[in-house]
Amino acid sequence: MQSARKIETILQDTSLEAPLRQIAQKVFGGQRITEEEGLLLFEQGELAYVGALANFIREKQHGNRTFFNRNFHIEPTNICLYTCTFCSYSRLIKKREEGWEYSMDEIMDIVRKYDGQPVTEVHIVGGVLPQYDLEFYSELFRRIKAHRPELHIKALTPVEYHYIFKKARISYEEGMRLMKEAGLDSMPGGGAEIFHPEIRDQIAGGKCTGEQWLRIHEIWHELGGRSNATMLYGHIEEFRHRIHHLELLRRLQDKTGGFQTFIPLKFRNKDNQMSHIPESTVVEDLRNYAISRIYLDNFAHIKAYWPMIGRQAAQLSLAFGVDDIDGTIDDTTRIYSMAGSEEQNPALSTQELAGLIRRVGREPVERDTLYNVIRDYTDYVFEEEEAYQGYVSLPVVSKN
Ligand code: V47
Ligand code: SF4
């Protein structure tokens, strides 16, 4: 771990603008940076500089430990009545025959496919359609819990909750309470996009507002629940919109402490209404991870979602503030492959994931959804049979 030495070098670097040196001093001293300073980092912070700061924080918090979990995703439908311009799903409402709409039994068949496998979490999220309502999801959560009580249900976002509670004519408070009773364990971070209405109205008009997204998370945290947060960046937003987004998350986290992880999501431009917008560079992606790590001083974890950015960028991100690279995702996570993500078939075995982490000098640690450690893989020697426990759908040959 060399981050402390790097920070000392930065503090002594007289060629660095005074405000940037001041920010480094703050970070080194464990102080919070202001919105203005955050904006300055986005506008002027070079990759090596923000990376050194972010890595300092990351190593202070977690050392070399890098978390992942064993999970699977279910997308009940890829058809959606909203028309978010960045989303490849929204166009399917007009061509419904090209999409899928799983029934309760079909979803339970997917859950049963994982019987006997050591997955700890099911992540459920998809499009919004009227038949997927309060009754449907309550019943689904109950059936999953009846079938496999220890499986952690991380499901739906305020986009769905806002829609189904409104349809059921109940308050957010009542709705979240019912979801908890039905078996919901935590909420994923989706649907946040960019909170600022100047951008949100253009890219995600019609679905829940930024305020509503934050309010539903707040209520869930008050009920004792945990959740994640995301930010969809690299499209039409400006740096000030990113800082506004991060600031609202930091404020809510100060209030509730209920967020676990922040996941920056890089906008991918295939097959959506914003295909003309070029995607952000890897340098910008890494800067964005780093600045998020620096700004969100009250978030324990920053996650890189590897199916979206690819394995190599995920490995790089581990030197820029990221300490979590999501899970051994098997399945059918199609929202990203449709939008042009690096990974057309996002599945990685535990062995592959641990290998990716080790090859960049970090220590792989399997966690459950709530970051309880399941197993430390730092010095673990994989046995053939264990490595192949049903996760591998790609050849084990490394792509790196
Ligand atoms: O809200 C949709 C994004 C999100 C595109 O909490 C796109 O552990 C990029 O939130 N380019 C859903 N992004 C996914 C999500 C998530 C993923 C992994 C882990 C967790 C977690 C949460 O996907 C949506 C939207 O922001 N998205 N289309 C696109 N073209
Ligand atoms: Fe629907 Fe979500 Fe896609 Fe928006 S991002 S169109 S709410 S599936």
Image (spheres, grey):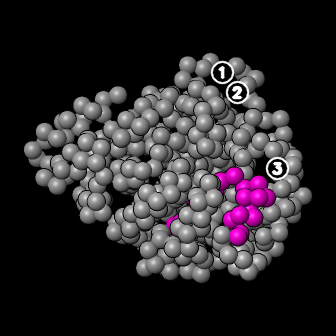
Q: How far apart are marks 2 and 3 (CA)?
A: 27 Å
The first of marks 1 and 3 along the sequence is: 3
SS category of the residue bearing label 3: helix
The first of marks 2 and 3 along the sequence is: 3
Q: Quadrant of residue 177?
A: bottom right
Question: Which residue occupies the foreground of this view, 254 or 119?
Answer: 254
Q: Which amino acid does label 3 sit on?
A: Lys
Q: In this view, does 142 lie to the left or right of 85?
A: right
Q: Quadrant of the N terminus?
A: top left
Q: Do the residues labelled 1 and 2 touch (CB within 8 Å)?
A: yes
Q: In this view, does 206 lie to the left or right of 256?
A: right
Residue occupied by mark 3: 145
Q: Relative to residue 380, is residue 205 depicted above or below?
A: below
Q: Does the magenta stretch include residue 400?
A: no
Whole-percent x, y for residue 276 in the image: 48, 72
Residue occupied by mark 2: 387
Q: How far apart are marks 1 and 3 (CA)?
A: 31 Å
> Where residue 153 is drawn, which disc sits there?
none
> Where residue 382 is drawn, which disc sits there?
1
Name which residue lies at 68% across and 75% down.
Answer: 171
Give the magenta part as a residue range. 174-193
Neighbour class for label 3 at 10 Å: few (<14), some, many (≥20)?
some
Q: What residue type is labelled 1?
A: Phe
